């Protein structure tokens, strides 16, 4: 009896720990609410939903008051949160983003090469030091992508050569 109780308790503690693993991978808690992370009102979201019923997600900029030091120190200058378009009235104090996108767009080809490659490698090195080697590495003609898979989420780091941008994306599963 004691052994089964111990195993049940161990399984419960492990599940609690793994569920929190994805909360704050890139310096912003993905389980925070729309109210905590944005300056948008419920009425604005509802209006967007009425005007864009076919869109699956609502993209909203992260408000300035939220700590973005980790991402800015890595070189990202735009942070977007993606909320599921529930196509009904949303309580912004209850919903959390499905993804967080950190973006850096380079204005010209001269700025992109070699700066983008240096930034991509610096971000990859930082993520590797925190989370180990990536689970996937795809090198293509137009993009390089690394991904780290966790129990409840995935991190993607991508260098898009056509759009001259670097994207770091934290997505819930």
Image (spheres, grey):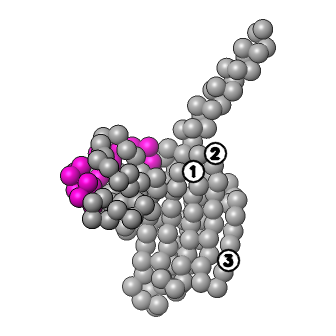
Residue 156 point in image, percent of width and height: 57, 63
Report the side of 12 relative to 65 (left or right).
Answer: right
Percent position of residue 111, x then y: 44, 86
Residue 169 placement, left or right of 6: left
Disc sitting over residue 139 in the figure: 3
Residue 80, horizontal then vertical, whole percent: 38, 62
Mark 3 Cα within 10 Å, few/some/many (few <14, many 20+)? few
Does residue 6 show up? Answer: yes
Give the image quarter of residue 138.
bottom right
Q: CA distance from mark 1 to mark 2?
A: 8 Å
Comparing 163 with 119, the one in front is 163
Quick one: label 1 or label 2, which is nearer the N terminus? 2
Was residue 13 drawn as part of the magenta stretch in this picture?
Answer: no
The residue at which mark 2 appears reads as 151
Q: Which residues are magenta?
A: 27-48
* Mark 1 lies on residue: 173
The answer to whether residue 46 is magenta is yes
Percent across and percent down for residue 173 are 57, 50
Mark 1 neighbour density, 10 Å: few (under 14) some (14–19) many (20 or more): few
Q: Check contact, mark 3 vs mark 2: CB within 8 A.
A: no
Distance, label 1 to label 3, CA atoms, is 24 Å
Residue nearer the viewer, 31 or 113: 31
Quarter of the figure with residue 15: top right
**Badge 1 element:** loop
Does the rendering let one see residue 73? no
Q: Residue furthest top?
A: 1
Are dots 1 and 3 in contact, CB under 8 Å? no
Decide: marks 1, 2 in contact (CB < 8 A)? Answer: yes
């Amino acid at each position: 009896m004691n052994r089964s109780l111990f195993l049940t308790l161990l399984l419960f503690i492990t599940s609690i720990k793994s569920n929190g693993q994805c909360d704050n991978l890139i310096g912003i808690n993905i389980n925070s609410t729309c109210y905590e992370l944005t300056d948008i009102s419920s009425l604005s979201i509802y209006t967007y939903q009425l005007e864009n019923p076919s869109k699956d997600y609502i993209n909203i900029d992260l408000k300035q008051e939220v700590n973005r030091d980790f991402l800015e120190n890595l070189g990202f200058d735009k942070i977007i949160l993606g909320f599921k378009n529930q196509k009904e009235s949303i309580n912004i104090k209850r919903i959390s983003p499905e993804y967080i996108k950190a973006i850096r767009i380079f204005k010209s080809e001269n700025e992109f090469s070699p700066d983008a490659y240096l930034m991509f490698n610096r971000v990859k090195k930082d993520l590797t030091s925190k989370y180990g080697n990536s689970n996937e590495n795809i090198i293509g003609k137009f993009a390089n992508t690394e991904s780290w898979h966790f129990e409840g989420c995935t991190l993607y780091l991508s260098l898009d050569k056509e759009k001259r941008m670097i994207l770091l994306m934290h997505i819930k599963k």
